[in-house]
Amino acid sequence: MTIRVLAAAALALGGSVAAAATTTVPFASNFSQHHLAKFDGTATYDSSAHTLTLVVNNETDPATGGRLTAFAFDAGGHSAIFQDPDGGRKPNTNGFDELRNHRGNIRTPMGMYHAGAALNGNWGGSGGMTHAIAAGTSQTFVFDVTSLNGSSLTVDDLLAPGKSGLEIVAAFKGLRHHRSDRAGGVMSSAVSTVDLSDSGTITPPNDGQFQLPPLTTPPSNNNGSGDTGNPGGTPGTTAVPLPPAAWTGLSTLLLAGAGAMRSRLRRAIA
């Protein structure tokens, strides 16, 4: 009953009940300086754990060779810290470290970004190339997102486009004839959402009034003698509508709960 009353009070305030969810979007490169390197992947944000997971695929033609050595994204003004499996220790067994930045800014040839990972944490570095993402392979990266409204963010809040319009950029080394390349990409499809809440989404009815499900009677214990609401005596339930007086009392309770929530929100903001 307490959960239902709080949900109804939130709806009475004109808001909605936030549900834990993951949002996922694919991305793909649409720009390459030398028309050699390509990448794509998926980005998934978990609003409950406040983590952003990027699966980065190096789609460069294996005949061309080349390894993806760094990538960066905007993070939409939020802090996104790479979960380094090595914890920043040396020697680095997976090659990628938090991309070095200056006061939260990462300068790349394709613009300014604010989060990412690179070999030895250096956008232009090439040390440890065996740990870079080879053509035709992929790697998964997880970032911890810090934000005052982290529970309400979605993945597209973190892949905001930079000034160049590119939402994620990458560097490549060791291509054919010892060349390097850089590429940029954008979200390639709509964002999809998976609701992780147990109770699902609460939607108000058309008249704008929150209504509780009907009360039910306990299962029959007549040992198969049968009853009118449950032929054959099989345990079941029968809907019993609430009387008008009960609805009046419940409405009063909901309004009181809404007022209490308003007061708490004002005190919290103050």
Image (cartoon, grey):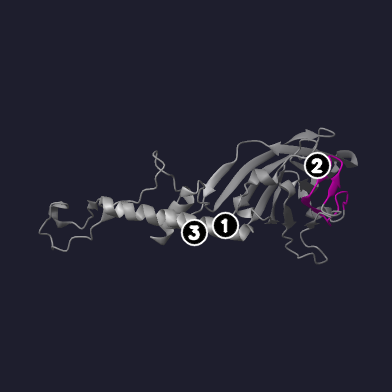
Assign the N terminus to one quadrant of the image: bottom left
Q: In what element is the residue under mark 1?
A: helix
Q: Nearer the viewer, residue 157 or 257?
A: 257
| Mark positioned earlier in the residue sequence (1 or 2) | 2
**Residue 110 sits inside the magenta stretch:** yes
Locate residue 159 relative to residue 264 in the image: left or right.
right
Which secondary structure, mark 3? helix
Q: Residues at badges 3 and 1 in contact (C-beta under 8 Å)? A: no
**Residue ID at (21%, 60%):** 219
Mark 3, residue position: 260
Which residue is identified by label 2? 65
Q: Given the image, on which type of amino acid does mark 1 rest?
A: Leu
Q: Residue at x 17, y 53 (%)?
A: 230
As shown in the figure, which amino acid type bears the numbered disc 2? Gly
Residue position for label 1? 265
Q: Nearer the viewer, residue 210 or 155?
A: 210
The residue located at (72%, 42%) in the rendering is 160
Which-is-in-front pick, marks 2 and 3?
3
Q: CA distance from mark 1 to mark 2?
A: 57 Å
Question: Can you give x and y, in whole percent of width and height, for residue 178 in the image?
Answer: 89, 42
- The residues colored magenta run 105-126
